[in-house]
Amino acid sequence: MEGIEGCGKSTQARLLSAHLQARSIECILTREPGGTRIGDLVRGILLDPKHADMSPRGELLLYAAARAQHVDSIIRPALQEGKVVVCDRYTDSTVAYQGYGLGIDVEIVKSINTIATDRLFPHLTFVFDLEPELGLRRKFGDAVTSSLDADRIEQRTLPYHARVRRGYAKIAEEHPERVTVIDAAQSAEAIHQAVLQHTEDRRALLAGTR
């Protein structure tokens, strides 16, 4: 589940996980950065506004370190057990936020993602597309990024969040075989129904190739 701040991806991740479990499909719901004890420690460093002096390269590598631990400890073992993994953010977040958002060479970001995941990439990715202003307003009201509740990434400027959104559009353009873009300005229920439809379509497609 991917998208800019306030797009509703975490809600959709929970709804999809609950739907799968209700159908007796074994799945786990996890998130990035975090998902493990070590990953959560790294998450605290990454998102703490006190670390405003963190360099783009340092930020990129911290995300990669948390992801490597997450893949090795949580995601790959779950997949090996035949479970579905629903993940709130993954590799595309790093391409969008640190690559397109911060201006790090996207090919370098992709290479680091490959190392961090040991080439484990998703079968299906949902990008919930939304205007940055609307997303931030959903989270913080009229205060937008000046909110005291905003983390280090959320506090960045609107132009930064606009670059991230364009980055997601580019990712979707480059990977139509796995990326589905959904208009996140709709109601949560309408978005959920779209997610379910695309998920069932993909499950049927994967089943047909076995």
Image (spheres, helix red, strand yellow):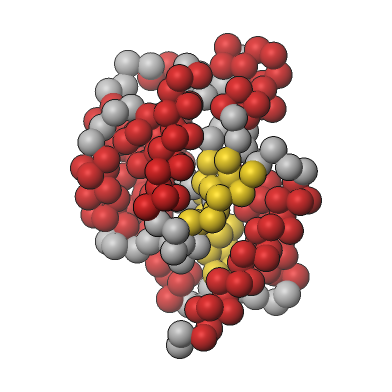
Task: Please report the residue visible at 45 percent of the width from the left and 50 percent of the height from the top.
Answer: 172
Figure check: 70 above or below 169: below
The quarter of the rendered structure image containing the C terminus is: bottom left
Q: Residue furthest front?
A: 173
Figure check: 197 above or below 114: below
Task: Please report the residue visible at 65 percent of the width from the left and 12 percent of the height from the top.
Answer: 143
The number of numbered discs placed on residues in the rendered structure image is 0
Q: Residue 130: horizontal and vertical position, in percent?
A: 60, 35
Horizontal placement of 2 versus 9: left or right? Answer: left
Horizontal placement of 188 versus 110: left or right? Answer: right
Horizontal placement of 39 versus 129: left or right? Answer: left
Task: Please report the residue visible at 70 percent of the width from the left and 77 percent of the height from the top.
Answer: 24
Q: Quadrant of residue 160?
A: top left
Q: Is residue 33 visible?
A: no
Q: Residue 52: horizontal and vertical position, in percent?
A: 38, 16
Q: Residue 182: horizontal and vertical position, in percent?
A: 61, 49
Figure check: 67 above or below 201: above
Q: Quadrant of residue 10?
A: top right
Figure check: 168 above or below 124: above
Q: Residue 108: horizontal and vertical position, in percent?
A: 21, 42
Task: Please report the residue visible at 58 percent of the width from the left and 79 percent of the height from the top.
Answer: 204
Q: Is residue 57 visible?
A: yes
